[in-house]
Image (cartoon, rainbow, N blue to C red):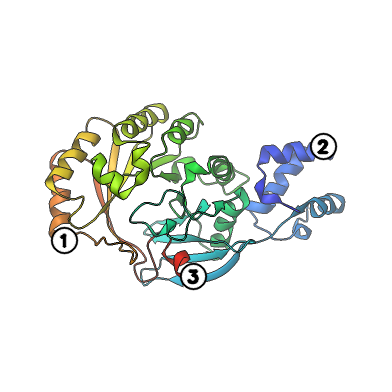
Amino acid sequence: MKDIRNYSLDEFDVIFNGWGETAYRAKQTFSWLYQKRVDSFDLMSNLSLELRKKLKDNFSLNRLKLDRLQESSDATKKFLFALEDGNLIESVLIPVKERLTACLSSQAGCPFSCGFCASGIAGFKRNLRTGEITGQLLEICYTLKNSALTNVVFMGIGEPLDNYENVLKAIRIINAPQGFNIGARRITISTCGIIPGIKRLSAEGLQIELSVSLHASDDKTRTRLMPVNKKYPLEDLIIACKDYAALTKRQVTFEYALIKGLNCSKEAADNLVKLMSDWECKVNLLVYNPVKEFPYQPAEEREIEFFVWLLRKKGIVVTLRKSRGKDIDGACGQLRAKYLK
């Protein structure tokens, strides 16, 4: 049986038309899945018994299995889901003031093996299907009761632009009025710097936010931390990001984890200023959340303050983000790696 959540609304239209049903019925079914969030075709009460039977005969409607749920002292919640084939993925719910942000995974494992990130420790298994991506969001929504999600970020396990088709289909479902109805500008894709994917994304006609994991301001250091830099070096990456900003009219964000003694010197700040100056972008600095499998440690307070001061002095838009979920295997991939062992 095919998971019905793997299909877009346009695909619903084609299927329903083949059954002699109207596009209106397709939209009703879509709304049952994502607005009313039912987990049984029998609950779709405004559909005919005949149509509900066709749906049951042709599709499955299964929920993700919640393996573990951890809640931090700062109210961050981390979900560990078990997929049908035994793979594990993570999602996170992050409450900050007026925002409720869901952080989703796009792959089971990660093929890019960044030298500081737990996501790739247990290796890459496979891409997530569209229904497994939106399924994470549904499970998070079930826990919210009277609250509503405001933002969605693809910053969990995996590289979203390496699973392009399924991620974009999920984003269109998340954005659709009959879907989760979350505005495009409240949806963020985070990439390690897959230039062809960035170029492709810029032509989609979606004003979603682009976040790029940078973490170093020179090729030598970035390649040490992120082997993907060998294929897509900094100069080419920045050009692609500038083009994205120009085409979409959206500000690109660069994520930069501050690692003790490695990437927060004056020279590193000067290099970053050269990359960020004179175009629409900003830098999110975060203190590195250590992973025991790697040798790196978070930058010390004096290093952080000096680095932030240097960037702001040169007019770079900088946010120093507070780390979340440190007491619950907060770094991306840590919880999955822990229970795959």
Query: What's the mark number on residue 18?
Result: 2
Answer with mark 1 or mark 2, whichever residue precedes in sequence.
2
- Local crowd at mark 2 within 10 Å, few (<14), some, or many (≥20)? few
- Local crowd at mark 3 within 10 Å, few (<14), some, or many (≥20)? few
Q: Which residue is mark 3?
A: 339
Q: Which residue is mark 1?
A: 301
Q: Residue at x 49, y 70 (%)?
A: 339
Relative to 234, does residue 40 appear above or below in the rendering? below
The amino acid at mark 1 is Glu
- Cα gap from disc 1 to disc 2, whole angstroms: 63 Å
Secondary structure beneath label 2:
helix
- Cα gap from disc 3 to disc 2, whole angstroms: 44 Å
* Residue 52 pos. (x, y %): 81, 53
Relative to 327, does residue 28 appear above or below in the rendering? above
Q: Considering depth in this image, is 224 or 213 the residue closer to the camera?
A: 224
Secondary structure beneath label 3:
helix
The amino acid at mark 3 is Tyr
Answer with mark 1 or mark 3, whichever residue precedes in sequence.
1
